[in-house]
Image (spheres, grey):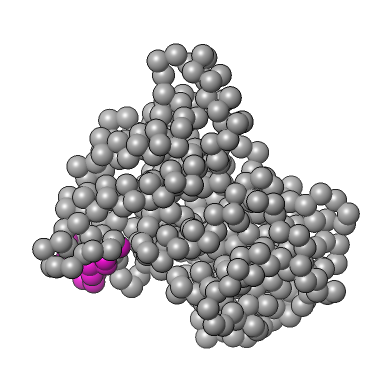
């Protein structure tokens, strides 16, 4: 499937300055005090604000202005009625001073955000020009640029055109999967956009909910693929403020202690990786992070309110509650990816869902088989990849 051809074009998008003023007036009752701002800055330890001298500052300001205007369309004209095929193929191009921003499948993503309980105004305020994006040092081998919204709730990543084509081709089935399994571990994709400066080449980027949110007390972060080749990251020096995402080999000797939630996680991993296998997708990662629970957060009897959320079809009786995920309320806006064990809170999510097992990957598999005999690497068939990642979770949890 090709990226949809340009659709409706707006001659001039609304001014982001107007958006900043509107966002400021509408949120004045929620202005942050001095102590809140100091606490917010402390939780950003190891992340870097993209200031005026940053090499990506120009790109960031265009993304912010474009996203504010793009979201204003769904604020003013929210999609109504039943979803249509046009929702998944629409392309809206908005012309700004010096650049154009395209919104791909805008109505489909607006519906998805609404189904997640995400208000368009909050989404707009977080991604618009109200505060600088944050950057972290990625351990990914790709040449993509990575951003976080200033509140760290949303993750932005540049993508290749062929990866965007895959995501859009799979979008209807992806939405159906989330409807059927509302507590799926799949990353929540919230938008796909293109950006063209002057007459230059289009750049594509995606927006999704950050798996590592809220990030305040997260101790360690990992990117897991269930293999060993190129799966080690040299840790930052002790006391360093740098935030690094470790990999499989860094996790050796560690275990996720999930208690009764382990059966839920194993089942949900099976459901989600089966779906990705059917799409012939591979090379995705299980993002994993954990934090120590405070004493009053451990178990169901403390000051934190818990509930049993059914994430799989067919759960009918209270006896099956042990196989369901206990979700945190109401302090975790991104609780879809939060799982509590007896002593630790785990953040889990499957990301990078745009690599298909085509000819390119088949040739890569052959080459790596010859180069790394007897070792495990990421480029294998979708069925093998799914099975191996599920086996990793089973072997590293209790």
Q: In which quadrant of the rendered view does residue 70 lie?
A: bottom right
Q: In which quadrant of the rendered view does residue 220 lie?
A: top left
In this view, 246 is above or below 30: above
- Which quadrant of the rendered structure holds the C terminus? top left
Give me the residue at 17% from left, 63% from top: 321
In this view, 370 is above or below 103: above
Q: Is residue 214 left or right of residue 339?
A: right
**x then y, percent, for residue 188:** 48, 59
Magenta highlight on residue 27: no
In this view, 239 is above or below 100: above
**x then y, percent, for residue 331:** 35, 70
The segment highlighted magenta reads 299-311
Q: Is residue 352 left or right of residue 248?
A: right
Give me the residue at 54% from left, 36% from top: 357
Give me the residue at 55% from left, 74% from top: 83
**x then y, percent, for residue 383:** 40, 36
In this view, 381 is above or below 123: above
């Amino acid at each position: 499937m090709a990226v949809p051809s340009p659709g409706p074009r707006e001659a001039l998008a609304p001014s982001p300055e107007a958006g900043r003023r509107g966002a400021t007036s509408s949120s004045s009752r929620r202005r942050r005090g001095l102590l809140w701002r100091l606490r917010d800055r402390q939780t950003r330890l190891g992340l870097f604000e993209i200031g005026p001298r940053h090499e990506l500052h120009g790109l960031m300001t265009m993304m912010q202005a474009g996203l504010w205007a793009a979201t204003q369309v769904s604020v003013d004209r929210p999609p109504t009625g039943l979803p249509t095929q046009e929702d998944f193929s629409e392309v809206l191009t908005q012309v700004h001073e010096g650049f154009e921003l395209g919104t791909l499948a805008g109505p489909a993503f607006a519906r998805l955000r609404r189904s997640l309980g995400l208000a368009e105004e909050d989404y707009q305020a977080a991604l618009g020009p109200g505060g600088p994006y944050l950057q972290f040092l990625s351990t990914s081998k790709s040449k993509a640029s990575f951003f976080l919204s200033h509140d760290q709730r949303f993750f932005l990543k540049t993508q290749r055109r062929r990866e965007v084509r895959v995501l859009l081709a799979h979008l209807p089935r992806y939405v159906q999967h989330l409807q059927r399994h509302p507590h799926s571990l799949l990353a929540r994709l919230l938008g796909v956009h293109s950006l063209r400066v002057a007459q230059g080449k289009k750049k594509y980027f995606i927006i999704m909910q950050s798996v590592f949110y809220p990030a305040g007390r997260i101790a360690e972060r990992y990117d897991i693929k269930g293999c060993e080749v190129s799966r080690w990251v040299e840790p930052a020096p002790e006391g360093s403020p740098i935030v690094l995402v470790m990999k499989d080999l860094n996790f050796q000797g560690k275990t996720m202690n999930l208690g009764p939630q382990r059966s839920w996680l194993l089942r949900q991993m099976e459901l989600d990786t089966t779906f990705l296998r059917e799409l012939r997708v591979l090379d995705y990662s299980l993002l994993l992070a954990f934090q120590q629970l405070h004493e009053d957060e451990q178990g169901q009897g403390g000051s934190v309110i818990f509930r049993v959320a059914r994430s799989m079809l067919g759960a009918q009786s209270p006896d099956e509650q042990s196989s369901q995920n206990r979700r945190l309320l109401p302090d975790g806006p991104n609780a879809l990816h939060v799982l509590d064990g007896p002593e630790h809170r785990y953040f889990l999510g499957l990301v990078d869902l745009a690599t298909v097992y085509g000819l390119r990957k088949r040739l890569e598999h052959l080459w790596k088989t010859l180069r790394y005999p007897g070792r495990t690497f990421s480029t294998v068939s979708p069925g093998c990849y799914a099975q191996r990642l599920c086996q990793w979770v089973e072997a590293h949890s209790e």
